[in-house]
Image (tube, rainbow, N blue to C red):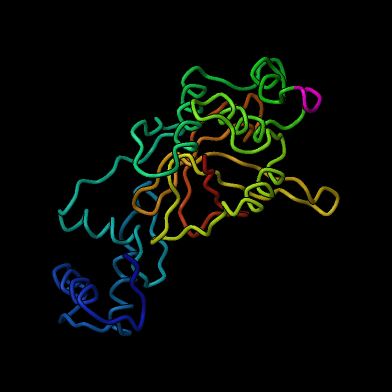
Amino acid sequence: MFLQSGDKGPDVLQLTNDLVSLGLLSAPGSIFNAGVVNAVKKFQAQNLDPRGAPLVIDGEVGPLTKYAMDVVLGRRAPTPPPVTPSAPVRTFSGGSQSGNAALKVAIAEMDRGAGEKGGDNLGPDVEKYLNGLVPMGSSWCAGFVSYCFANSTSGIPFKYSVGAQDILGQFKKKGWLYTASVTNPPEPGDIIVFTRATKAEPWLGHIGLVNSYADGIVTTIEGNRGPYPSEVTTFTYVLGRIANLLSFGQAQP
């Protein structure tokens, strides 16, 4: 659900009834007017999202605000804020067969503590992810994603690559990229690609795999992020507020 100023209908009526119950609005209505915007902002100023972080005070009702309102009104139990790294979701709903198979490999790598050993961008795990395509010491996030697909039960449906933006380009040519939203959220096993580009190195990027999506929060499994010793682990993002995001993509068999 996403509601904002100017919206009308039964969803707005339910929202205003909730705001009345919370003592933030004097009477319900079916129009998301200025009074409703102010009431939502008051609610957001006092409550937290599923990660335990303050809600953004924008007067709009998306998944994070809806989650908080349901918790306050007793319609659901609060989600414990994740501890980084959090345990990955192991039962998948949605996504492609290829992506789900790759995600299982990613979880297995995370479970065994795969990552750098002996130095930045070094170690046996990094070596196998790079697959002999570039020298040891090179960035390995894309190699990790390629490895997960290549060693899955479905196989790799694109050319093994150690370049995040190269994989992005391959997905674009195949028509596998999409814009994620509340109504079209990312699914397990989808790729998520970020830019790290500079004028000197416009090709730089970063890539990971989506593990899950719930209540406006995207959880991923990524490698080669953070200082040495970087390990394969989980990260969380708020959908719609992901810095440096280039695109999501869903591999097909």
- Decide whether residue 134 is among the magenta residues: yes
Residue 152 in the image, given as x and y percentages of width and height: 52, 26
Residue 133 in the image, given as x and y percentages of width and height: 77, 27
Q: Is residue 208 above or below residue 76?
A: above
- Dominant SS of magenta comes to loop
Residue 38 in the image, given as x and y percentages of width and height: 32, 77
The residue nearer to you, when weighing 38 against 192, is 192
Tell me: 200 left or right of 218: right
Tell me: 247 left or right of 93: right
Quarter holding residue 182: bottom left
Where the N terminus falls, by quadrant?
bottom left
Q: Is residue 97 above or below residue 231?
A: below
The residue nearer to you, when weighing 231 against 133, is 133
- Decide whether residue 209 is among the magenta residues: no
Q: Residue furthest right?
A: 200
Residue drawn at the location 68% of the way across and 36% of the way down: 159
Residue 37 in the image, given as x and y percentages of width and height: 33, 78
Residue drawn at the location 30% of the way across and 71% of the way down: 40
The residue nearer to you, when weighing 197 against 248, is 248
Q: Which stretch did the figure color magenta?
A: 132-137
Quarter holding residue 156: top right
Residue drawn at the location 49% of the way across and 36% of the way down: 98
Total number of numbered discs in the rendering: 0
Q: Is residue 22 above or below residue 13?
A: above
Q: Residue furthest front?
A: 253
